[in-house]
Amino acid sequence: MAEESTTKELGLPLILKSDLVMKEKINATFQKIDAAVLPKTHADTKAHFDMWQPNKDYKKQDVVRSSTCPSWGFFMCKTPGTSGTSEPSGYGEGDVATDGTCTWILKLFGGATVIKHQDLQGRNLPDQHTIAAITDLQSVLDSKETPQNKGKAGGYPELNNSGYIPMSQLPPNVKEMRVLNTIVDRDAITGSLLYDGLQVHVLNATADPTVKSGWAEYMYDAANSVWIKRAEKESMDIVLNWMNLQDIPVVLTELSEKNGALQYKGNPVYEDIRNVVFVGGDNELMYPWNGTIQNIAVVCSEPQATALQFNIEVQAKADYAAKADKWTLAGGSILTFPANTAYQEFTGLTQNNSIKAGDVIRAATAGDDTGIVFHVTIKNN
């Protein structure tokens, strides 16, 4: 086989028929360089772009170039199908070309998928782009104001020397408050002079039933066709909601009501406790309130050797007045005070323990011993 005189791809000359000691190494280096470059027929490499072909089936995302394709881009198949007889053409990135049953989109090498007007570089897009072909450019141009619209209807307001919008360009409901003499004058405003947000100051507003004397200010609510009072000389008719008050003391938030009685954290704030005292037995007292007998305490100044039986009795006012002698035992039974005892409490009186205003209560014993004192505790309702 004849010895090659040049490399395959780059055609680098090789050293032949020489006794040069380094010939083999030099030629090997040339071959190594030559092998590192793309071959002249590199259709099988990833860097290769096929040229567009007519009447050829293309799949989605196939890429080609054409003779009219800009140097900065390539066509990618957007809709698969069969190409026609005329190659696709485009001018800017994103252009779509119809080719037979295929559609192609012109893509930019390494660029953005959408070029907006603010992103245009100029160096890779030709100047024949139309405004409509540049995304969002027309809408941006249309949104720009011109000096001719300054201070005009549909335009924009001008600023005065202090940087403020002059009063002449503010809407009437912002800048105006009309001064009127009476409510009649207010109600006489109609037509174009009556608009939503109109404010009036009525010098004598006493025709308004909520105003006792003096002036009042109103704003017109066009949606409901009513005048809303905003201020008056004497006071405003304001209804405050407890939930809208701020900085309410915590102690007030814990207050509640039950059966007409004030409570704090669920406990009664005040209990009307009365103490009825009987010295000795058979004393009678008309009780002036409705209540419940809570307990009975017995005090004996000289403890006795024998136990003492006693009753705390209640009789209804009507029965007492009729001398019916219908006494009920508080607690439901006769009570016993132990012998040799100076003090004793009787609690848990759940039967016959209610008493009404005007009822008569008494302590009844076997005898009248002034050395014994009965304390009856009653909680008023």
Image (tube, grey):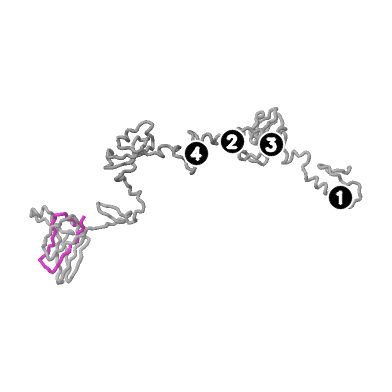
Please give the residue where the numbered disc 4 appears in the rendered image.
158
Q: Earlier in the sequence, mark 1 or mark 4?
A: 1
Secondary element at image label 3: strand
Indicate which disc, 2 or 1, sits on the residue closer to the N terminus.
1
* Residue highlighted by disc 2: 137
Along the horizontal axis of the image, is 79 left or right of 148? right
* Residue drawn at 19 percent across, 68 percent down: 343
The span picked out in magenta is 353-381
Residue at the far left: name it.
Answer: 323
- In this picture, is 296 found above or below 151? below
Instruction: Find out whether residue 362 is within the magenta segment.
Output: yes
Q: CA distance from mark 4 to mark 2?
A: 27 Å
For the C terminus, the quadrant is: bottom left
Residue that badge 1 annotates: 24
Residue designated by label 3:
74
Question: Dot 3, crowdedness within 10 Å: few (<14), some or many (≥20)?
Answer: many
Asked if residue 9 lies left or right of residue 86, the reply is right
Disc 2 from disc 1: Cα separation: 64 Å
